[in-house]
């Protein structure tokens, strides 16, 4: 049975959080960011997001903590969740994948770090080259952990109801596409 839940997954820097916040605002839904939740856990432990990802490779409790929070959200209604694994934990959700090339993503993330206090504290990078290295490490760490823990590959786009290239669409267009397609999806049986 379909739920009034939208899960937004995607590549690094594809606009998951920005899209999720705006979609939630338009639909008057709540918003949850597992990325922010994870970043805050890292800050609480005195670790950057990359360091926390590396620590999670040997301490599965870190991912279990985040994933337990996502599983609890399965009981929610009217929520937009940006997360790389929520689509897996909430299969009855409207599952969106935002796609973006790494080159464009690194510039977007660098700009986001400059504007967002939580990201600035957790990312700890200054140049796009340093960011690209950390992005690659983070992505590889996440993919390995998700596979080892759950046998999931969140880059397999066949698992999603909607795929959007966020390089070809600006934020407003992406948000409008998600809202429009979600409304069509929820109205179908």
Image (cartoon, rainbow, N blue to C red):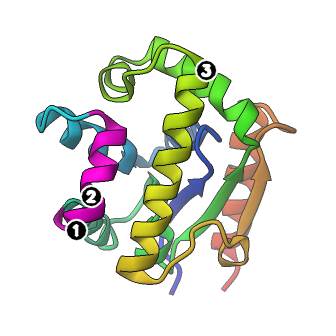
Which residues, given as a range, are shown in magenta?
48-61
State the image coordinates of residue 112 (x, y, percent, origin top left): 52, 21
**Comes first in the chain, label 2 or label 3:** 2
In what element is the residue under mark 3? helix
Residue 159 position (above or below residue 44): below
Marks 2,1: beta carbons within 8 A: yes
What residue did someone put label 3 on? Answer: 128
Residue 129 position (above or below residue 141): above
In what element is the residue under mark 2? helix
- The answer to whether residue 113 is left or right of residue 122 is right
What residue did someone put label 2 on? Answer: 56
Q: Residue at x 38, y 45 (%)?
A: 35
**Comes first in the chain, label 3 or label 1:** 1
Q: Residue at x 52, y 52 (%)?
A: 139
Q: Residue at x 67, y 61 (%)?
A: 182
What residue did someone put label 1 on? Answer: 60
Residue 167 belongs to magenta span: no
Q: Say which quarter of the image contains residue 65.
A: bottom left
The secondary structure that most of the magenta stretch takes on is helix
């Amino acid at each position: 049975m379909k739920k009034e839940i939208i899960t937004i997954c995607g590549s690094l820097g594809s606009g998951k959080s920005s899209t999720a916040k705006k979609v939630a605002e338009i639909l008057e839904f709540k918003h949850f960011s597992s990325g922010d939740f994870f970043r805050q856990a890292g800050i609480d432990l005195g670790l950057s997001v990359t360091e926390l990802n590396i620590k999670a490779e040997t301490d599965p409790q870190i991912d279990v903590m985040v994933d337990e929070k996502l599983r609890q959200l399965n009981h929610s209604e009217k929520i937009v969740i940006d997360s790389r694994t929520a689509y897996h934990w909430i299969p009855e959700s409207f599952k969106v994948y935002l796609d973006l090339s790494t080159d464009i993503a690194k510039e977007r993330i660098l700009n986001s770090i400059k504007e967002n206090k939580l990201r600035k504290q957790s990312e700890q990078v200054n140049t796009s080259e340093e960011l690209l290295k950390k992005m690659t490490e983070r992505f590889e760490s996440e993919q390995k952990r998700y596979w080892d823990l759950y046998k999931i590959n969140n880059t397999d786009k066949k698992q999603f109801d909607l795929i959007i290239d966020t390089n070809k669409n600006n934020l407003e267009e992406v948000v409008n596409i998600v809202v429009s397609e979600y409304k069509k999806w929820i109205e179908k049986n």
